[in-house]
Amino acid sequence: MDVIGLERFTPGHALGSSSGGARMVRLTGAEHPGLLPLARRSRQLWAELARAGQDGLFTPCGGLLIGPESGPLAGGALRTARAHGVPVRTFTATALRFRFPRHTGVPAHHIGVWEPSAGLVRPRRAVRAAVALAERAGARVHTDSRVVRVERVPGGVRLHTATGSVTARQAVLTAGAWLPGLVPGLPVQPVRAPFSRFRPLDVADSGFDLEGFPVFRRELDDGRILWGSGAQGGDDVGLGLEDGGAAKPVDPEDTDRSVTADDWSDLARVLPAKVPGLETLPVRTAVGTRTRTPDGLFVCGRPGGDPRLVVAGGGGADSAAYAPGVGDALADLVQGAAGAAGLDFLSPDRFG
């Protein structure tokens, strides 16, 4: 198979959904039972990519989920674990405080779910490693190649770039925040996604290292998700706040990612009550984008059943964990292999 990749910027750039710090890789995604096979395949492929790529790309360190037992995050993960035999350990709010003392202000009806098989992945490193492996396998990758229009032609697709065009039998579009501009009608909304790094008030405090403050996702009282991981490998503590005040719809064509206080102030206000011991002024904030869909799941499939076109994207920060499994499924899809079965729940046409 002849494969050509067109990258608008350079692999691992800081403007899209791979921007920011580490993401949790876990098996207990609760949004849909169909995600578990993708999660298992992704977990396997992350480890393979790390062995073939670079140090620090994937770290199997376990992961923590915090939220109401009846809620979608921790409660959903626990239900998934019980239904599918994924080993986890649960903590009451009181026990959580002793095991993970950096997390405070946990309501009594919240629980902690510790998944030992979870880990963290660094998306920008992962993108660069995956592209390098693809090139080694014979793919041609053109950087600084902005696709401005997708034209469906008899027998294939023509991708128009700023400098020319490429025609192929099939096109796989994984353009992140730029996907809606290439496939009008997709219910994918790009939003601003800041990510900040903080230092402990006490520079000698080792409790915020990754071992004591592992990668986590935490549902707050108002339903927002606080996520992040401890200091590791020279990186300070990394934190983000999903659906905070800075998560505003954006035009991805505006590549200005200038940081303002609005990008970190909501997060900083959460810290004294929920993660005390950190300075509330970040040492660094970066702004990328993420995309969301009406049901929180990503889209993956052929829009309108068109055999010439495949799309994948959306789903927010947590969907990064599924990237290699989705890529594997997309490869099966374009080749007509049996492994592409079971993705109907992610169809881009599911919203009607």
Image: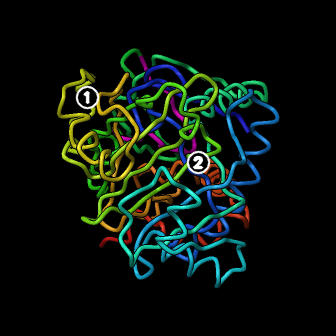
At which x and y percent is residue 46?
A: 71, 45
In this rendering, which labeled residue sits more in front, label 1 or label 2?
2
Q: Residue at x 67, y 34 (%)?
A: 57
**Residue under label 1:** 253
Badge 1: residue crowd in 10 Å (few <14, some 14–19, many ≥20): few
Residue 9 lies, with reference to residue 198, above or below; the image says above
Q: Find residue 257 and report its image quarter.
A: top left
Visual colour scheme: rainbow
Residue 306 appears in view = yes
Secondary structure category for the residue under label 1: loop
Which three-letter amino acid code belongs to the residue tagged 1?
A: Glu
Distance, label 1 to label 2, CA atoms, is: 35 Å
Q: Which residues are magenta?
A: 164-177
- The residue at which mark 2 appears reads as 214
Left or right relative to 181: residue 335: right
From the viewer's side, name the closer residue of 50 and 155.
50
Give the residue at x 58% y 54%: 322
Counting from the top left corner in percent of width and height, residue 134 is at 71, 31
